[in-house]
Amino acid sequence: MTIQLGKPEYRLKVFKDAQQFTEQQLRKFLSGYHRDRREGQPHHVEVVVEKNTLLNIVEDICHKFYLPLTPLRGYGGPSLWERIENRFAESGKEKCVVIILSDHDPEGLTW
C-alpha cells in the first residue's frame, strides 16, 4: 500500500554496477506476492481518512487487513468516490462498507 503526500517525484533508479543491481534484485525476489485475504469475506470494506495526521496509525491497520485506504486531505471530490465505487464493483461483493475517519467539521457535511 502506497500513500503519496504532496506532489509525486520521479527518479530513475541507477546502480554503480551489474553486481549491485543483481544483489538488489535477489533480495527482492518473490517478495511482492500477497494473497487476497479479503476473498472469502462477505463485504467489500474501504477506509477513508480525512486527516493526514491519522495516516501513520491507520495505514498499518489497513495494511495488516488488506483494506484499501483513501486519504481525503479535506474535501473528497467525485473522482475519489468513483474510484472507491470501481473497486467495489471489481470486488464482486454485494455490499460495500465505507469506514470514514473524520473530525466531522462543517466541510464534512457536504459528503
Image (tube, grey):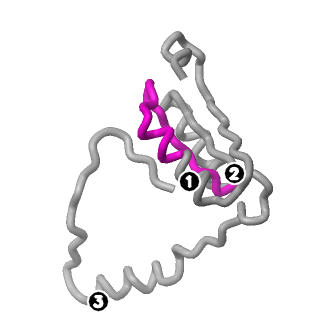
Asked if 68 appears above or below 110 in the picture, the reply is below
Say if mark 1 contacts mark 2, CB within 8 Å: yes
Q: Residue at x 29, y 89 (%)?
A: 19
Q: Which residue is mark 1?
A: 87
Asked if the magenta segment contains residue 74, the reply would be yes
What separation in Å lies between label 3 and label 1 (alpha carbons)? 40 Å
Whole-Å distance between the Cαs marked 2 and 3? 44 Å
Q: Amino acid at mark 3?
A: Gln
Q: Which residue is mark 2?
A: 44
Upstream in sequence: badge 3 or badge 1: 3
Q: Residue at x 55, y 15 (%)?
A: 109
Mark 1 residue element: helix
Residue 102: % across, % down: 59, 24
**Which picture quadrant has residue 21?**
bottom left
Q: Secondary structure at mark 2?
A: strand
Residue 92 horizontal/vertical position (percent): 67, 60
For the magenta stretch, what is the residue range? 65-84
Q: Amino acid at mark 2?
A: His
Residue 52: assigned label: none
Q: Is residue 10 above or below residue 16?
A: above
On the rendered structure, is 103 left or right of 2? right
Estimate how packed mark 1 is, as few (under 14), some (14 to 19) or many (20 or more) residues with alpha carbons within 10 Å: some
Secondary structure beneath label 3: helix
Quadrant occupied by the C terminus: top right
Q: The residue under label 1 is which amino acid type?
A: Arg
* Circle on res. 19: 3
Q: Earlier in the sequence, mark 1 or mark 2?
A: 2
